[in-house]
Image: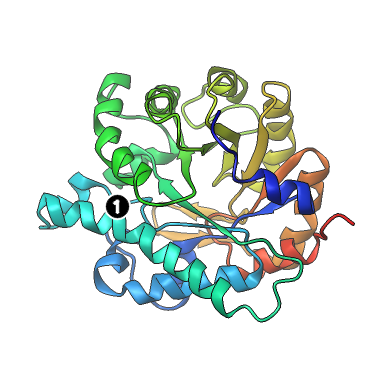
Amino acid sequence: MVKNPIEPFLEYQNVFVLDGGLATELEARRHNLDDPLWSAKILLEQPEAIRQVHSDYLHAGADCIISASYQASLPGLMARGLNEVDAVNLIRFSVHLAIEARDQFWAVMANRRGRLRPLVAASVGPYGAYLADGSEYTGAYDLDEAGLLQWHRPRWQILAQSGADLLACETIPSLAEAKALRQLLLETPEMPAWMSFACRDGRHISDGTPLAECVQLLNDVPNLVALGINCTPPRFLPDLITAVQTSTDKHIIVYPNSGEHYDAETNQWLGQSNPSEFGTISREWRKMGALLVGGCCRTGPAHIQQIRDRTRPKT
């Protein structure tokens, strides 16, 4: 049976703190991500900026940092002009950057009391992230399950052999894509992973499938160590956590966006996010049973620090 790398954290502190938005923090540091490659653009141009964001999340208290491979796909990188070998190497490099940041953090950390050595998760973004047309939030794809399986498999194989501690299948908007990833999980039984869905309300993922149905589909996958929700407004989380909890015995993971609204016409986020309030409501998610908690779009190190400040190792 595959070893669950998250268990030591839950046994020690009863919570597993994830990082926050990578692209959000890069934009806050004035990097231009207006590009189909999104944060993967910075992998090509200024990789040290990504390493620094990883480091800042670790210092904020994250138990896990997620690689910059969300939007880094072979067809996307090759469309930019990279050959296949260079595209493969860049995807691997995204994980190596995170591993280096983690190892440097752990090597220089003066006082390790109260912390376990953080993990690195390799991001497996949805097909819609490659399309860069908003379909990652609708699941309205031009590929069926078989096509999605074929599209995902090459990158999956790269990331599964990248040295990451686990895979993060995140922002999954459709049942067909969940089924395709389920097959890949079964093909790599030695690699632990989590899967989190983008949801449009308190019951359904983005394509309209009930979240409970998706969770039930995946509940018997041995190397899937957690199931849950990401990149979804916090107001929907109580109902969604209940839906997951009644459908699986696996750990529940939640890392919502800040609750701000994205205006596709103006390409702007509207509203405000208070890190302290985000940290406060994260306690409610944990009380409901979601022990893997972090942030997604429009959250940063300050949000993760607030989550960490509200957790204490068990005594």
In the rendered view, does 277 fall on the left or right side of 133? right
Q: Secondary structure at mark 1?
A: loop
Residue 27: x percent and y percent?
43, 71
Between residue 272 and residue 141, name the one nearer to us. Answer: 141
Classify residue 312 by image quadrant: bottom right
Work out whether residue 37 can be spotted: no
Q: Residue furthest right?
A: 315
Residue 198: x percent and y percent?
52, 38
The structure residue drawn at horizontal position 66% and vertical position 30%, both measured from the top left corner, is: 250
Residue 153: x percent and y percent?
28, 33
In the rendered view, does 301 fall on the left or right side of 92? right
Between residue 161 and residue 214, name the one nearer to us. Answer: 161
Between residue 125 and residue 200, name the one nearer to us. Answer: 125
In the rendered view, does 287 fall on the left or right side of 59? right
Q: Is residue 190 above or below residue 212?
A: below
The structure residue drawn at horizontal position 42% and vertical position 72%, both measured from the top left corner, is: 51
The 10 Å Cα crowd at callout 1, few under 14, some 14 to 19, many 20 or more, is: many
Three-letter residue code for mark 1: Ala
Between residue 21 and residue 107, name the one nearer to us. Answer: 107
The structure residue drawn at horizontal position 77% and vertical position 47%, both measured from the top left corner, is: 11
Q: Is residue 206 above or below residue 87?
A: above
Which part of the image, by quadrant, shows the C terminus?
Answer: bottom right
Classify residue 90 by image quadrant: bottom left
Which residue is under mark 1? 72
Residue 245: x percent and y percent?
72, 28
